[in-house]
Image (spheres, rainbow, N blue to C red):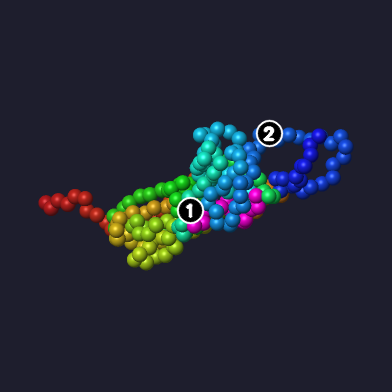
Amino acid sequence: MITQVKRGWLNSTAELHDKGDVAFYLPWIPVAALANDVTLEDKVIRLKQRLPGDPERYKSGYVLLDNEMVLFQWNGDNGLTLSMPPRFDGQKGLYRGMFGTQEAGHSATNCLAYGMPFRVWDTYKPREFDNSMVYFQWSTQLDLAHWNSYLWRQTIPQSDKNIVVHGMARLDGKGNFWDAPGMNDMTLLIDSVAGGGNVKVNRTGHLNDAGQFDVRFYVEYKPGSFDAQNPRQAESWKRCPKIQEIQAEYDRPTQTLHHEDR
């Protein structure tokens, strides 16, 4: 007999069950109790017991807290703490509310930490950066080139509207990819989500790393990508776009490579 059972785990709804209904044991889901409450800003999650598995191998991954997906990048105390880098403010955890879920507070009384299997990484946070973020970058350099536009072609499984590809272009190495987009002497950065269409640049590279043209791609998962209460209606988090082609249109002054008078 099972006594003192708490109901409604995994964001399920407590319901009536008939005598003779089958009960399933779920040992393959790593699960642990929280050692204390988790606030909106916490970057460290403390557990009463570590998630099942070797903590030397299970060093990073996603955990589900209520309906919030959280990415931890390393563990400590033999798996009893799950940690992530901070945001630029130094306080808030960077990888809270992943796969389009909402950052929230969680009670140690009512919430468990579920280790979640995953197919693709979600690390995108606008105006933030950490070396653990996932991106794809293409770069080229042409002295004195006037960059007219760029485009990329992408395939998004099932044309999923919850998945957005950011194609960010930077000229002359001016600015960082986490800066606010702008075209001025401090920052030459464009953030576009117009996959398949021409993105206007209209700028000649002559500053800093003159002629350097970088395009970096990030993938954003919008709200609705994951929902523990309606998993069959929220499957975007299992999908990943593909970048198939990158083009840059430019003009360049004519150069005389050899001249001979006779």
Q: Nearer the viewer, residue 89 or 221?
A: 89
Q: Taking the image as drawn, is residue 63 in sight?
A: no
Look at 44% across and 63% down and name the residue there: 180
| 244 inside magenta stretch | no
Look at 65% across and 37% down and name the residue there: 29
Look at 66% across and 45% down and name the residue there: 112
Locate residue 34 relative to residue 256 in the image: left or right: right
Badge number at residue 212: none
Badge number at residue 86: 1
Residues packed near mark 2 inside 10 Å, few (<14), some (14 to 19) or many (20 plus): few
Look at 24% across and 54% down and name the residue there: 255
Dot 1 amino acid type: Pro
Q: What is the x, y in percent for residue 190?
A: 44, 60
Residue under label 2, please give it: 27
| Numbered range of the magenta stretch | 91-108
Say if 133 sits above or below 91 in the image: above
Q: What is the x, y in percent for residue 200?
A: 44, 61
